[in-house]
Image (spheres, helix red, strand yellow):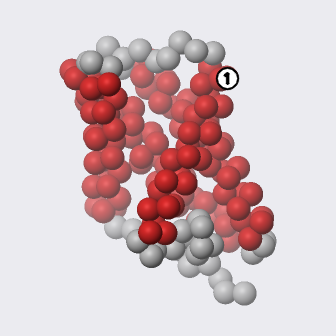
Amino acid sequence: MAEWQPFREPLRRTLKRTVGIAIVTGGVIALARGELSRWPAASVVMLWPSLGGHYVELWFLNWVRPRLSHSRATQIAARLVVWFVAGVLLGAGMWLTAAVLPGLRPPHAPVTRLLALAGVAFIGLEVVAQTWLQLQGRPSFFDGRG
């Protein structure tokens, strides 16, 4: 079996993409809440899934994946578990950041429900991102190369 190739990307490209995603999604959230003045703070919160999610993927691709069996089923199961746990942790970071930034209000639902939802939502987010990579002909979760 072939060895996994480490994933590398220039920091400038990573930051342009992830900060751009955070700014756009922060704006969408601020607009949806009717609080455009909260756009910068909402963008800071959205750095958790955009930039944090990028580093979760790097960790999986460059550290976790090479240590697992090459079995496709094992790779898929591990990826889904990593995405769920990462979603929970990133969701906690988002909640705590929203709690300390002036003018933002974290959701009032039970925290365990919010964190479980964050785990599932992060899986959904990653499926969308991986679909985009697949459509571009780049290595992705779906073809087993990414």
Q: Which residue is mark 1?
A: 112
- Marks counted in the figure total 1
Residue 102 in percent (x, y) is at 32, 15
Residue 2 in percent (x, y) is at 67, 86
Residue 26 in percent (x, y) is at 32, 34
In this view, 78 is above or below 35: below
Which quadrant would residue 122 be assigned to in this image?
A: top right
Residue 41 in percent (x, y) is at 30, 27
Q: Quadrant of the N terminus?
A: bottom right
Q: Residue furthest left?
A: 37
In this view, 74 is above or below 92: below
Residue at image location 74% in from the left, 57% down from the top? 77
Residue at image location 68% in from the left, 71% down from the top? 66
Q: Quadrant of the C terminus?
A: bottom right
Residue 55 can be seen, yes or no: no
Q: In front here: 137 or 64? A: 137
Give the class, few, some or many, for how many residues have Cα within 10 Å of label 1's Cα (few <14, many ≥20).
few
Q: Residue furthest front?
A: 135
Residue at image location 39% in from the left, 32% down from the top? 45
Q: In front here: 14 or 120? A: 120
Kind of residue at badge 1: Thr
Q: Is residue 43 left or right of residue 5?
A: left
In this view, 139 is above or below 93: below
In this view, 69 is above or below 101: below
Q: Is residue 108 left or right of residue 75?
A: left
Q: Secondary structure at mark 1?
A: helix
